[in-house]
Image (cartoon, rainbow, N blue to C red):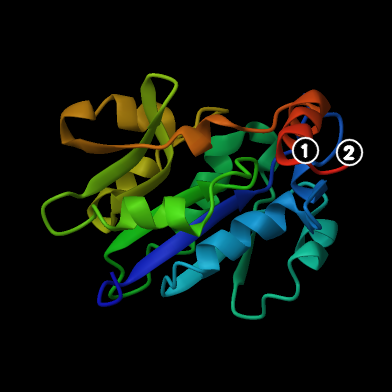
Amino acid sequence: MATRSLVCIVLAAGGSKRFGARKQLENLAGESLAHRAVRAAIECNPAIVLVVIGADAEKVQTSISDYASIEIVINDNWQSGLASSIVAGLRAVENRTNVDGILITLADQPLVDSSCLRRLLDKFDNDNRIVASAYHGAVGVPAVIGIEHIHELMNLSGDRGAGSWLKQRLASVIAVPMPEAAMDIDTPQDLEHLKSELGHDV
């Protein structure tokens, strides 16, 4: 993994309509959800960590400002849905040289840590060019995708993320079981339940 040039794109731009507040700013175990996701990415030692922000961009950027090595990408079109954030991140990658693969991860899957991401990265090589998490009976993100697919991914639109793209290519996907990714924070109740399970105060 260390010899490959990998870029990690952390998606933290959404408006969190169902949550009723910016969930990427919500606190869990002493850090924001955005901070947890960025930390997990950095601990995998990719060449670059790009963090895509949009809604309440200034506050989200402040919450991760202690990570000086990351690059911030502003998605001005965040209201159009998740795909716009993926595309914004990919645009920041497409003209870079020596990039072999892209790891896409989300700020609202707080149980996905660096060990989870490494399980994906360990399967990604010259032969296995699409490696995705398997949960809820399907494949989705986090996922590692070869750079050769970047222009296909840049055609994504609306509120569908990379999951729909992955499902259309199941024969080429290496699926890595990842129950941790099944916990995504959509509502305050989701976060309250997770805090209770982890033994943290709400």
| Within-10-Å neighbours for mark 2: few <14, some 14–19, many 20+ | few
Q: Residue furthest top?
A: 137
Residue type, mark 2 in image: Val
Q: Position of residue 171 (x, y in %)?
A: 16, 29
The residue shown at (23%, 36%) is 173
Q: Is residue 32 above or below residue 154?
A: below
Q: Is residue 39 above or below residue 183?
A: below
The residue shown at (35%, 67%) is 6
Compare marks 1 and 2 and give the one earlier in the sequence.
Answer: 1
- In this image, 93 relative to 39: left or right? left
Q: Residue furthest left?
A: 127
Q: Which residue is mark 2?
A: 202
- In this image, 170 relative to 58: left or right? left
Q: Is residue 42 above or below residue 32?
A: below
> What is the spatial separation of the Cα atoms under label 1 and label 2, in whole angstroms?
6 Å
Q: Indicate the secondary structure of the residue bearing disc 2.
A: loop
The residue shown at (81%, 58%) is 30
| Within-10-Å neighbours for mark 1: few <14, some 14–19, many 20+ | some
| Viewer-closest of 122 and 186 | 122
Q: Position of residue 182 (x, y in %)?
A: 52, 30
Asked whether disc 1 touches disc 2, contact meaning CB atoms under 8 Å apart, the reply is yes
